[in-house]
Image: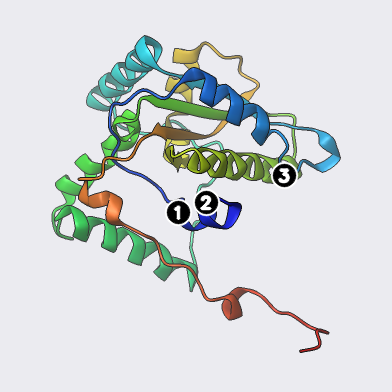
Amino acid sequence: MNVSDAVRCRKSTRAFLDTPVPEALLREVMALAARAPSGGNVQPWRLHVLAGEPLATLKQTMQERLAKNPVPDPAEYPIYPANLFEPHRTSRFRLGEAMYALLGITRDNKLGRLQWLTNNYQFFGAPVGLFCYIDRRMEAGQWSDLGMYLQTLMLLLQERGVDSCAQESWSIYHRTVRDCLQLPDNYMLFCGMAIGYADPDAAVNRLVSERFPLEQFATLQGFEN
């Protein structure tokens, strides 16, 4: 699989098989992904990866937290703007509607939608859960480095037939995750990531998000045909 194929094939997987992902494979792609661009070679990403018993413990902790008190922790950064504007608002809405249609959950079934969302905090059944942190002393420029690292990692996983789903949803329970991982206060949680092998029979995995056409987001000038 070349880079173009990996880009085309990569998508957010939301139902996984319990097939283990080899540690050696993860170590290889995580190390190689560090070749991602990083301004000034700062390399701000800090990763914590769980499988087996540590992952089961975290998932159980989150299940108990949601049952006892589902109210999110105080937000450390906004996942979306407070008033998301067009065309981005419609793009986000259409993605959600397409996903729930595949799941057979109607718009008026608010309980069903909320119950589905809790699957985020079980990593959608994936055998590996990754958390990406950044030191609070870093600035906005370093946040872009996190995205470039994570995209590189997901493409390298895809090249090897391993699926993934980046999950900013974990950031709203950052205190619970930090306490479970016993991390220092200066670590800020950016996102989680589910890693594993997609369940081919899960309807939700048929979801392929739309993308804006090039003309909508890019302007090219000075080129000769």
Q: Residue 44 at x, y = what percent?
A: 72, 31
Q: Residue at x 28, y 36 (%)?
A: 119
Q: Residue at x 47, y 41 (%)?
A: 168
Q: The C terminus lies in which quarter of the figure?
A: bottom right
Q: Earlier in the sequence, mark 3 or mark 1?
A: 1
Q: Amino acid at mark 2?
A: Ala
Let me know if residue 42 appears in the view: yes
Q: Earlier in the sequence, mark 2 or mark 3?
A: 2
Q: Residues within 10 Å of mark 1 (few under 14, many from 20)?
A: some
Q: CA distance from mark 1 to mark 2?
A: 5 Å
Foreground disc of the pair 3, 1: 1
What is the residue that sits farthest to the bottom in this orientation?
A: 225
Quarter of the figure with residue 56: top left
Quarter of the figure with residue 133: top right
Q: Amino acid at mark 1?
A: Cys
Q: CA distance from mark 2 to mark 3?
A: 28 Å
On the image, numbered disc 3 is attached to which residue? 140
Give the camera-side residue of 202 and 38: 202
The image's mark for residue 129 is none
Q: Is residue 184 left or right of residue 91?
A: right
SS assignment at label 3: helix
Q: Residue 157 at x, y = what percent?
A: 51, 38
On the image, numbered disc 1 is attached to which residue? 9
SS assignment at label 2: helix
Q: Is residue 190 above or below residue 63?
A: below
On the image, numbered disc 2 is attached to which residue? 6
